[in-house]
Amino acid sequence: MSVHIKVYQQGVETLLAACDEGLLGKIFKEGEIHLNIKTTFYGGDLVENISLKDKLKEATIINLVGKNCVKTAINMGLGYEEDIMEVEGVPHLQIVKM
């Protein structure tokens, strides 16, 4: 499956923003929570899952939206199921490596 990835470099920190294909530009709402998948933040390269794995290894701060992205990070041991937030059934996971 393809995902949108965008990498930001700030000093020694590497932030990875990634979302599953088909989610870019959408807004999900549940109560007071709004999850806005902004093109300006997530809208980088459209790549295959193997490239996502490489970028997940390199990143120090990770922001993921979508079943594929989140599952990939969990399977790599980068996050935990209990840390996943869902908005309208769409999983969102944030990870900070320390």
Image (cartoon, rainbow, N blue to C red):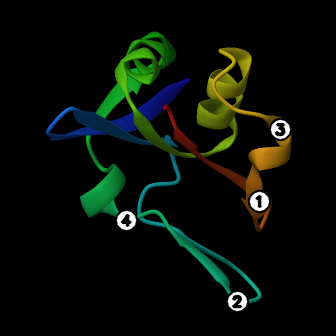
- Mark 4–mark 3 distance (CA, rounded to whole Å): 24 Å
Q: Position of residue 63 (x, y in %)?
A: 48, 46
Q: Which numbered disc flags the more N-terminal residue, 4 or 3?
A: 4
Q: Earlier in the sequence, mark 3 or mark 1?
A: 3
Residue 83 rendering spot, x and y as whole percentages: 76, 47
Reading the image, the residue beneath label 3 is: 81
Q: Amino acid at mark 3?
A: Glu
Residue furthest to the front in view is 98
Disc number lying in front (3 or 1): 3
- Cβ–Cβ below 8 Å for labels 3 and 2? no
The single residue placed furthest to the left in the displayed view is 11
Label disc, if present, on residue 32 of the rendered structure:
2
Q: Are marks 4 and 3 in contact (CB under 8 Å)?
A: no
From the viewer's perspective, is residue 72 above or below residue 18?
above
Could you tell whether 33 is left or right of 57 in the image?
right
Mark identifier at residue 38: 4
Q: Quadrant of residue 41?
A: bottom left
Precedes in sequence: disc 2 or disc 4: 2
Q: Amino acid at mark 4?
A: Lys
The residue identified by callout 1 is 86
Outermost residue, right side: 82
Give the left or right position of residue 57, taking residue 88 as reference: left
CB under 8 Å between discs 1 and 4: no
Name the amino acid type tagged 1.
Answer: Glu
Label 4 or label 3, whichever lies nearer to me, is: 3
User: Which one is in front, 48 or 5?
Assistant: 5
The residue lying toward the viewer, choosing from 30 and 95, is 95
Q: Is residue 56 above or below residue 91?
A: above
